[in-house]
Amino acid sequence: MADDYDVLIVGGGPAGLAAAEAVARQGRSVVVLERQNEIGYPVHTSGGSWVSDMQALGIPEHLYHPVKNVVFVSPRREVPLTYQPAVACVLDVRGVYQHLAGRAIMAGAIVRMRHTVEQTLLEDGRVVGVTVKNHVGERLTLRAPVTIDASGFARHIGVRTEMGPAFHRYGYGAEYDLYAPNYPQDELFLIMGSAFAPRGYAWVFPRGNGRVRLGVGVLHPDCDDDARTYLDSVMNMPQLREKLRAASPVEYHTGLFPSEGPVERFSRDGLLLAGDSGGHGSTLVGEGIRFAIYSGQMAGTVAAAAVKAGDSSVAFLARFDKQWRARFGRDMDISYMINKHIANYSDEQWDNALDLMKRMTPAQMAQALRGDFTAGLVMGVLARNPGLIATGGKRLLDGMLERINKPTLAAAEG
Ligand SMILES: Cc1cc2nc3c(=O)[nH]c(=O)nc-3n(C[C@H](O)[C@H](O)[C@H](O)COP(=O)(O)OP(=O)(O)OC[C@H]3O[C@@H](n4cnc5c(N)ncnc54)[C@H](O)[C@@H]3O)c2cc1C
């Protein structure tokens, strides 16, 4: 039977849309199958990101809101940092995702809304297509030499094709998107401690035009708390009460983010996993949008090359695993190591962590939050915190150094 497309993409989130643009730019036919009615809706992310990445990814300035002041709060400490110019930003999530869709379409991709992928077609162990229920309830069969599973937390194809089980450990987030007329739009908060976000953290992210996303994320199954029940107490924190005077939600979001580190393999015959479905986001702070875009671009480029070469075997597609691990693998491993270390912090440990942050420079803090781990960063933190040598923090830094100094897969293979 003839193939309908060169590449099928399951999911129209940032990974799927970036992959579609990359495939189409190589002159290959590609369709994105998205089960929702709109790209970028419902929102299930708070959209915190970095100005430098948005610039590198060609996201127009009007789609992100730079924020200069970042305040960390623990039960008994507060660490305010100022960046001039701003390094962090908060995205217009729907706007950015629709922009990515526009770019993919401009390059020649087809996007199909309210198309829910159901079954995976396998022939001789190779993924050759999917069945889809379309917007009028018809069931279609679509075939392609390469399918990219960019279905996010669902991992719709991955879990049905022996690419590892469904995610077991995850961040569960709930968020108000507020109209907050009195909130200072140049200040974001990250809040730790048992009163507001046990086994996780709370955030307040201004996003321009009087809008503010205020959310709580908790790690399951590390705890069984319900993130939703903490939102109102965060709104009433002494530090926020005046800033959030007269504020009221106009949207309510919930979402799940995999928190297990990258899955073991991202490729098999006829299939690639990109974005959250491959565990490609950073577990350090639950940040995945820019990583989903980078991963989608990489997966789409490899998929198009496989089609061109007439070879969609795992031997060819595993280039994606190698490229991704060479660029992101080490930092993501370290992020996950830190995530596991801090997930059980007591209130006192969070206070101590903020004491440590006070001694770091704003640039070091930004580098650490971004997950750009280098020996220079670790040594710099140690130099400013000689007391760490005697604590459990030293073991963590030693573990980081060990991983930083380990050659990456690509380097090891010469
Ligand atoms: C509460 C919360 C807060 C977050 N905050 C941030 C943040 O501040 N900054 C940041 O960078 N990241 C954040 N993240 C993470 C970020 O949202 C994800 O990493 C990112 O959305 C991953 O993109 P993706 O394209 O891989 O998956 P998704 O964005 O999840 O897209 C997957 C798409 O696949 C579709 N789909 C699923 N199954 C099917 C199917 N069977 N058929 C058709 N379509 C299907 C879905 O409808 C969806 O549109 C947060 C996540 C959560 C849950």
Image (cartoon, helix red, strand yellow):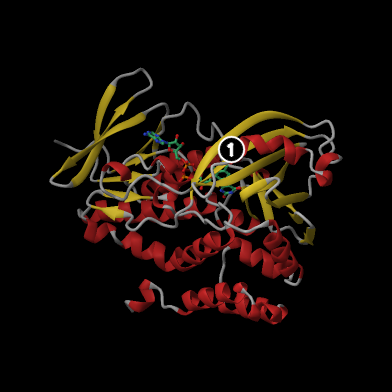
| Secondary structure beneath label 1 | loop
Residue type indicated by callout 1: Asp
Residue 355, given in percent of the width and then of the height, sits at 75, 67
Quick check: 196 left or right of 263? right
Q: Is mark 1 within 8 Å of ligand 1?
A: no
Q: Quadrant of residue 235?
A: top right
**Number of marks in the rendered image:** 1
Q: Quadrant of the C terminus?
A: bottom left
Residue 252, given in percent of the width and then of the height, sits at 63, 31
Quick check: 115 left or right of 400? left
List the single residue furthest toward the top.
Answer: 136
Residue 277, given in percent of the width and then of the height, sits at 40, 47
Above-or-below relation of 66 to 119: below
Q: Which residue corresponds to the image point at 74% horizontal and 38% vertical from the top-left?
A: 233
Q: Quadrant of residue 384?
A: bottom right
Q: Quadrant of the N terminus?
A: top left
Q: Which residue corresponds to the image point at 54% horizontal and 59% vertical from the top-left?
A: 339
Residue 305, given in percent of the width and then of the height, sits at 29, 56
Q: Residues within 10 Å of mark 1 (few under 14, many from 20)?
A: some
Quick check: 400 left or right of 391? left
Regarding residue 50, the answer to whether it shows in the image is: yes
The residue that mark 1 highlights is 226
Q: Which residue corresponds to the image point at 43% horizontal and 52% vertical from the top-left?
A: 279
List the single residue furthest toward the right.
Answer: 242
Regarding residue 209, the answer to whether it shows in the image is: no
**Observer-nearest residue: 172 or 16?**
172
**Observer-nearest residue: 95 or 210?**
210
